[in-house]
Amino acid sequence: MSAVNAIARALPIPAGAGLARTLIERNARAFRHGWITLVSGIFEPIFYLFSLGVGLGALIGDVDTGGGRMVEYAAYVAPAMMAAAAMNGAVFDSTFNLFFKLKYAKLYDSVLATPLGPRDVAVGEIGWALLRGLLYSTTFLIVAAAAGVVHSWWALLALPAASLIGLAFAAVGMSVTTYLRSWQDFDYIQLALLPMFLFSATFYPLSTYDESIRWIVQATPLYHGVAMIRDLMLGDVAWGILAHVAYLAVMGLVGVLFAARRIERLLLR
Amino acid sequence: MATTTLAQPREGRMAGRAFAYWLANYRRVWRGSIISGFLGPLFFLLAMGFGLGTLVDGGGLGAPGYVEFIAPGILAAQAMQTAVGESTFPVMGALKWQRQYHAMLAAPLGIADLVLGHVAFVAMRIAITSVAFALVAVALGAITSWWVVGAVFAAILTGLAFTTPVFAFAARQDNDSGFNVLFRFIIMPMFLFSGTFFPVEQLPAGLEAVAMATPLWHGVELCRSLVMGTATVAGSLGHVAYLLLWVVGGLWLALASFRKRLVT
Amino acid sequence: MISAHRLTKRFGEFAAVDAIDVEVRRGEAFGFLGPNGAGKSSTMRMIGCVSPPTDGSLRILGRDPATDGPAIRARLGVVPQRDTLDEELTVRENILVYGRYFGLSRAHVRAKADELLEFAQLTERANSVVEPLSGGMKRRLTIARSLVNDPELLLLDEPTTGLDPQARHVLWDRLFRLKRSGVTLVLTTHYMDEAEQLCDRLVVMDGGRIVAEGSPRELIALHSTREVLELRFAADDHAPYATKLTDLAERVEVLPDRLLLYTDDGDATAAAVQARGLEPLSVLARRSTLEDVFLHLTGRTLVD
């Protein structure tokens, strides 16, 4: 957990005490009581993989990955499910769960009475979301490899890549959550997530779209996440992958700083 | 001295009052439900039907194209999801958090009124989202048959086949963690494997039998065969009867569960 | 321990705390008294380093909360007005996890948790979840939790509001013990008996300002008389009686159902009343309390 602390210290304001790990510890303890929720999250991407990839995939021929290379549909869709699961998990943790802790459980009111500061809260919660995401992506990768849809050892890098997607979305999700007023507002988060999940070249190639709307798809963060993990799992690695990494890293960094500021404004009044 | 007794209808006859409450409540929050109840299925239709559909070889589907195959499937699946969404957290909330049921029982309403009134409201919600989706599917050319009207009724019946059992389930939960299990291990797999996205014949034989036992498969089959014009009287009646069995069985369980929870 | 000079907290135009001066010394029990909305909780939040002052200076344990917040909070214990227990954890875990927030070692907090559970009489409920606990138990757990870092200064915001009399007495007993062991207590309350029981010194706040300060005894001596005579007459309106009795007491207050005569000798005044041929239904001479001071200073009108 010292990496988490290093991140916590490296960031400029707002204040923290470098104790973010203790908040992660708290979440781990809380989840021992609700482990079924934790475990159930593993299955969603796996169900999607077998439904669309294998079930529907039988009716679909090979798919062009973009560079003219053809792969079977399950291998095409599996990386997308891994990326989308990283997004969904991170967003769920940083919006729904965070909102509950912020507004109802008043968890941070007691946390901030200790040496922990708003930066620790932001780093701790995002760190927890990443650890949880790592559990999901690791399980998924093992299942995908067993199903024979992983084509390269580069796929091991899909694990940190999924964490990067998680970081980017958790940070932005956390920032958004600080503006939410009621549970009804969560419908708007769904409104942003679902189209991204469905339209970001997740289930079919970008070339399906008309030239004029491709750039919209390419502007979304999930597109970059899916493209990055697909390159890794299929072993099509080129320097271009760094563009995806850069996009998500900037999103994550800006998001963390902004989220910590927002939490400070919200709690330290 | 003469005592006056207010003539009260028998229990179950005042469900309209409970329905009216939920309707009034809905007026305050309907905006959000449009997103989850209507735009969601529309996005699925666009992405799967028109996007992914370009890759699908329609030969094994028994439909002109993948869009035509998937549209009635999503109609039924959406009814299920609306039904489950409306029968989980709102029911637990009315039992435990906002305690509207307790307030209703303090008024002269009985258990049957509570349950029937709330179920009627959920049916209305399913009807709204189903009609809206059907209109869009027709406008986009994904459904072309006039039998779409029948398919909407089939979708409402499908939704009700989930509503009443989930009411019973929700009334037996102490907290919402059971819902997680319900969503992730029952509803989600049904959504993905019960014929909405691909014919269940693609599944291994054992799983195919499981899929065919789910109410969603019967709902999907009923909706699809109606709009494709492949429905037979016997087959349709079979699906309807099976779905009704779930509605009635679920209602019986729901009444028992509510009574156990609220009348002590 | 705490030194505030012209300390101010404004929310927009509204001054919740308006230029107050406060000194709290090591080892004493210091109280903030006042009606709802007087600015007590805002003051406590500033002292707890979770609310930056708008104006004035504030030093806690010799440090500046603006720059040394975490270091100060490491030495504070905070009992907020509303219990903010972690409902996803058990009783014992609440203390363990909270101790970890202070960077204390696992072994240390484990030992400390046992000791605090004992202190809060919660040992038997250690592995229970928090939700089903009674209000008094939750309050004791909140206090136990706030002691996990052996604080030098304990901040208690309305520690016994909403508790039944038994639970309040148990809590008072625990707070006495803490005070005896050298912990400095700062508390807010609107219960006068609590203030008289616990506080060595206190300030009365109203409308964001300090309207009086001193020990309970001093405040009574300064703002009230030694005794109060309560008279009830067989009449709907007590005001006419008041005019006949003004010269018998330092101050006469008219309430809907009785008259209060502030005097140094209740019995003598009662005799004087009867000497004037007035026959009250009931006569009660009692000692002046902090409540009399409080109501005199902050008025009887309902504030919220």
Image (cartoon, coloured by chain):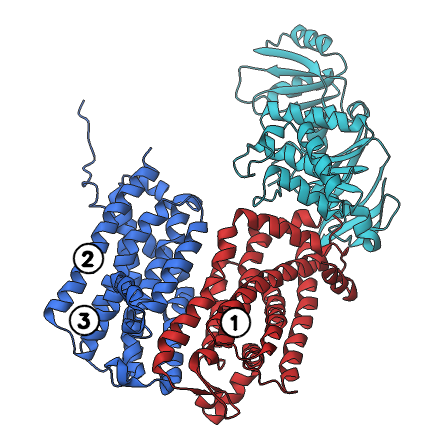
Q: Which mark is residue A181?
A: none
Q: Nearer the viewer, residue B129 or A219?
A: A219
Q: Which residue is mark 3?
A: B150
Task: Label 3, secondary structure: give it.
Answer: helix
User: Which picture quadrant has residue C2?
Assistant: top right
* Distance between the alpha carbons at the discs numbered 3 and 2: 16 Å
- Determine the chain carrying the residue at label 1: A
Q: In the rendered image, what is the letter of the chain coloured red?
A: A
In the displayed structure, A174 sits above or below C22; it is below
Residue A188 lies left or right of residue B95; in this view the side is right
Q: Which residue is mark 1?
A: A82
Q: Quadrant of the C terminus of chain C?
A: top right
Q: Which residue is mark 2?
A: B244
Q: Residue C153 at what x, y percent from top left?
A: 80, 38
Q: Residues within 10 Å of mark 3 (few under 14, many from 20)?
A: some
Q: Residues within 10 Å of mark 1 (few under 14, many from 20)?
A: many
Q: Nearer the viewer, residue B189 or C69?
A: B189
Question: Are the residues flagged by discs 3 and 2 from a single subunit?
Answer: yes
Task: Label 2, secondary structure: give it.
Answer: helix
